[in-house]
């Protein structure tokens, strides 16, 4: 102790302690009991408790030497500057990772001895990590999507966070994510491509034969497959077959029907739609920014007229009255005139005996040559999707998505027994709707063969003389819907399924079908545990024996606006032969330049997805001269 006293006497006789205002006296080897923050009468003060240990350290010591020979403990009261310098150096050494191996080993030794919280946390997290990894792998399928991977990873992290504790949680959680990600990408990753009906491809991640992307060349080559089967019907409706869930429009609208055609309706008369005809081997789809074009002509006012008419369509029993002008180059669209006159002449659309009236105005063929001067389609570029109202002029699709076939003479259909040899129809819905139309003629001398021998049916003679030559025709029309399970049915109105009476008679007529927008998608009435959405797939038309042509001009809006209108051809409306049974098959899916329009999962309003009204009309019979 003498050495300690000598060293202390060379310093100040008294120094201010950092633990209070107590003074350190070297001669007595003790601190005075000057405690301004404590009370002498308080035996349980913090200062008294603290100074008991300080005095013990400065006198006898703590006897914490573990050596063989006892060594006295030496204490030195360092200055504040020295204390903070040493403390900062130790803190830096503990928090930073040393560069050399010797310092790093020393650092790890000190850390393991002193950092008990981290040591406990690491041991706890290392014990929980295998449990969380096992929770991720529990009942894991052979391959799965990224969404499924994220759900399982969230479950594994939840299990990990329930038991992990301490500062090492974040580091081990990151390790868990990396382990699960590595496991998923090591042979368990599923193909993320969706089919055109919204189903995932169930194969492991792969490439296809048409894949031009610079992806992983080690991936296997195989076609997409969702393992979903769809029961569909051929073009004419007489044969049903199972098809794979399509992943491209060609498989949806062309390949399946070509295969069915070879087994059923190959020999039937059909109207071919325009498609791309390559003049060179190096043909390619064009990359375009869609430029709005007119459906029927290049007059912008006519386009605005058609849009306004479609957006303000109403449903009901209003009878349509249309005026057809043949041979007029400025108005070569039948549909524009039909929709315009339907709006202008609503007050005159009520005819006797619930008949629609169609006025045929005969004009001179002075502009046939002008009408034939249309733009020739490209022979080097083709549309990547389907023909629609925003397609660039002069481009055609590579394959047809529509089909128009003639089943045979009109006698194939009997209104008493309904459709025959048409599988899949729900009982009581396999009938066509009668459409009685009064055809009025102008310039009777131009149609001597047509008017000759015809008399107005069920009309008074005075009215016939006043209104001009007219006659009635009966047309049978059917709007057919089909779901993915092969169930087929007809609709008698935009919101009603066709039903026959108990005696097997059809009370409805086709006025609501021809004079209204028809929904593209309709709930399937077949009772099942999971309701299905049926799609408008076919238009059945039985033409009359009268020497006139029933014409079709279909336009389909497959999605809510803004959405282009899809149609089979830009030319004049399709003319059907007399006294025949025709079936127009619509596309299974619709695709534009920006991709396909997927079918909805739930029923949609008619204004969102629809077949526009004004599709049906009557034209004069052209003589071969």
Image: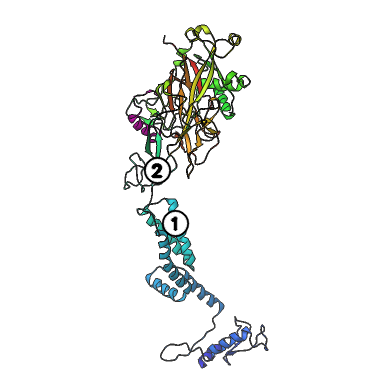
Q: Nearer the viewer, residue 197 or 12?
A: 197
Quick check: can you spot residue 282? no
Coordinates of residue 155 in the picture (x, y in percent): 46, 59
Image position of 550 with respect to 114: above or below: above
Coordinates of residue 571 in the picture (x, y in percent): 45, 21
Q: Which residue was labeled with disc 1? A: 152
Query: Residue furthest toward the front?
Result: 503
Q: Nearer the viewer, residue 28 or 513?
A: 513
**Label 1 CA crowd tier, 10 Å (few <14, some 14–19, many 20+):** some
Mark 2: which secondary structure?
A: loop
| N-term-proximal mark, 1 vs 2 | 1
**Label 2 CA crowd tier, 10 Å (few <14, some 14–19, many 20+):** some
Image quadrant in which you'd find residue 59: bottom right
User: Which mark, residue 228?
Assistant: 2
Image position of 375 with respect to 423: above or below: above
**Residue drawn at the location 40% of the way across and 59% of the way down:** 138
Residue 304 among magenta residues: no
């Amino acid at each position: 102790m003498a050495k300690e006293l000598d060293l202390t006497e060379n310093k100040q006789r008294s120094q201010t302690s950092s633990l209070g205002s107590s003074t350190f006296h070297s001669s007595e080897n003790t601190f005075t009991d000057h405690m301004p923050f404590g009370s002498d009468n308080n035996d349980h003060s913090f200062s008294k408790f603290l100074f008991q240990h300080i005095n013990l350290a400065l006198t006898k010591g703590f006897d914490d030497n573990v050596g063989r020979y006892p060594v006295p403990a030496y204490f030195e009261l360092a200055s504040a500057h020295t204390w903070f310098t040493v403390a900062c150096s130790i803190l830096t050494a503990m928090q930073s990772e040393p560069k050399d191996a010797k310092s790093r080993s020393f650092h790890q030794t000190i850390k393991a001895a002193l950092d008990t919280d981290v040591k406990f946390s690491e041991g706890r997290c290392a014990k929980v990590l295998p449990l969380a990894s096992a929770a991720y792998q529990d009942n894991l399928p052979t391959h799965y999507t990224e969404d499924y991977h994220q759900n399982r990873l969230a479950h594994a992290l939840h299990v990990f966070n329930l038991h992990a504790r301490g500062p090492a949680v974040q580091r081990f959680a990151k390790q868990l994510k990396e382990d699960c990600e590595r496991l998923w990408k090591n042979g368990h990753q599923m193909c993320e491509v969706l089919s055109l009906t919204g189903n995932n491809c169930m194969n492991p991640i792969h490439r296809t034969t048409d894949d031009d992307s610079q992806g992983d060349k080690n991936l296997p080559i195989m076609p997409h497959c969702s393992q979903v089967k769809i029961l569909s019907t051929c073009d004419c409706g007489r044969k049903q077959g199972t098809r794979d869930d399509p992943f491209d429009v060609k498989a949806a609208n062309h390949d399946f029907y070509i295969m069915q055609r070879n087994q059923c309706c190959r020999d039937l008369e059909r109207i071919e739609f325009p498609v791309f005809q390559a003049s060179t081997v190096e043909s390619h789809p064009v990359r375009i920014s869609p430029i709005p074009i007119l459906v029927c002509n290049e007059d912008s006012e006519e386009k605005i007229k058609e849009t306004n008419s479609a957006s303000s369509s109403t449903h009901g029993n209003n009878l349509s009255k249309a005026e057809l002008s043949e041979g007029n180059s400025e108005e070569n669209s039948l549909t524009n005139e039909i929709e315009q006159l339907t709006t202008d002449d609503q007050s005159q659309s009520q005819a006797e005996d619930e008949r629609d009236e169609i006025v045929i105005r005969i004009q001179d063929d002075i502009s046939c040559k002008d009408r034939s001067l249309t733009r020739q389609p490209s022979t080097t570029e083709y549309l990547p999707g389907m023909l629609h109202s925003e397609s660039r002029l002069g481009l055609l699709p590579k394959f047809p998505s529509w089909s128009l076939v003639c089943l045979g003479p009109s006698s194939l259909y009997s209104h008493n027994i309904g459709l025959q040899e048409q599988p899949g129809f729900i009982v009581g819905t396999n009938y066509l709707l009668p459409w009685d139309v009064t055809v009025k003629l102008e310039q009777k001398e131009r149609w001597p063969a047509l008017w000759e021998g015809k008399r107005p049916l069920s009309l008074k003679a005075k009215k016939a003389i006043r209104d001009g030559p007219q006659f009635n025709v009966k047309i049978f029309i059917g709007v057919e819907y089909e779901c993915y399970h092969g169930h087929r049915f007809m609709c008698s109105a935009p919101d009603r399924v066709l039903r026959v009476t108990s005696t097997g008679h059809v009370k409805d007529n086709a006025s609501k079908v021809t004079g209204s927008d028809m929904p593209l998608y309709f709930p399937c009435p077949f009772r099942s545990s999971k309701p299905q959405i049926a799609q408008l797939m076919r238009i059945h038309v039985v033409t009359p024996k009268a020497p006139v042509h029933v014409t079709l001009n279909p336009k389909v809006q497959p999605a809510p606006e803004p959405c282009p209108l899809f149609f089979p051809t830009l030319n004049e409306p399709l003319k059907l032969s007399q006294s025949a049974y025709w079936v127009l098959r619509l596309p299974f899916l619709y695709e534009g330049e920006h991709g396909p329009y997927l079918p909805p999962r739930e029923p949609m309003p008619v204004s969102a997805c629809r077949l526009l009204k004004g599709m049906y009309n009557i034209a004069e019979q052209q003589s071969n001269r």
